[in-house]
Amino acid sequence: MLKKIAFSVAAGAALYSSIASAHFQMVYTPELLRERGGQINLKMPFTHPAESGHVMKVEAPEQFYVIKKGKKTELLDSVKPSQWTSADNTGTSFEADVKLRGLGDYVFVHKMAPYFEESEDIYIQQITKSIVNVGSLPTDWNEDFGLKAEIVPLTKPYAIYEGGTFTGVVKSEGKPVPFAEIEVEYVNYEPDMKANAFAKEANMEAPADAFITMTIFADANGTFTFGIPKAGQWGFCALGVGSDKEHKGKELSQDAVIWVQAHPVK
């Protein structure tokens, strides 16, 4: 009986930890695959997109830049504070207006300031990649940039069919991270770019809470594959894989995040 109780407590703690850690730094624009360049707006709330959940209060990002054809352009000066509204609250967010000039991949890299998660007594810092392509000309999408925490895609993240798969390699400073734990969430509440808010209605109904934040593991080479059942944008977050492990005397979970978009089959 005592063993059963202990198991139940441990299971409940593990479930709570999983729910508490399901944070995603978004770098969102509606279309990751574009016919033409021009001005785009990128929204950057730190939130729970699968359930229009709590928007965490964060400081301005430490880094924000774009890489195109191997050239890095700093964009931190273009970042401005804003607000983001979910079903739970309205919280601090950031956004940036960026002009896309020419064909190819635009690899946006956002390194957030460490966020203190009081419920877990740890800091979280996510290094996020979102890749926007112009004109279906591939250039930089599968490059390894040697980030402290990074998911290197083996599938074009902007050219996936609904019902297709996404494959990536979890790395830290260019080295694969074996058996990395990866959380997966669907942007189930469409972001309203003008209102700076999630839509009130979900795109789909999860059959159970276990589907809100799904957990998968990479293999011994840091590689994982996930089947994408629904068109839209999906986030992958590899937990605690970064080389930095401590901040202000507390544990730091330095995570790697990447966003991908699946397209409907018509």
Image (cartoon, rainbow, N blue to C red):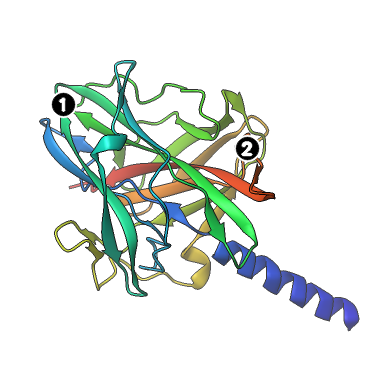
Instruction: Farthest residue to the right: give it.
Output: 2
Q: Which residue is mark 2?
A: 244
Instruction: State the mark number for residue 135.
Output: 1
* Residue depicted at 69% across the width and 49% down the height: 249
Locate the N terminus by quadrant: bottom right
Give the answer, above or below, for where 209 lies relative to 94. below
Pinpoint residue 135: horizontal percent, then vertical percent.
15, 26
* Depicted 230 relative to depicted 130: above or below: below
Marks 2 and 1, the one that precedes in the sequence: 1
Please indicate whether residue 125 sits to the left or right of residue 48 in the image: right
Across and down, in percent, residue 240 comes to 61, 45
Q: Is residue 204 visible?
A: yes
Q: In terms of secondary structure, where does tag 1 sit?
A: loop
Q: Position of residue 82 (x, y in %)?
A: 26, 57
Residue at 35 percent of width and 42 percent of height: 260
User: Callout 2 environment at 10 Å: few (<14), some (14 to 19), or many (20+)?
Assistant: some
The residue under label 2 is which amino acid type? Asp
x, y (%) of residue 93? 32, 56
Number of numbered discs: 2
Is residue 104 positioned above or below 12 on the image?
above
Camera-near label (2 vs 1) is 2
83 on left or right of 225: left
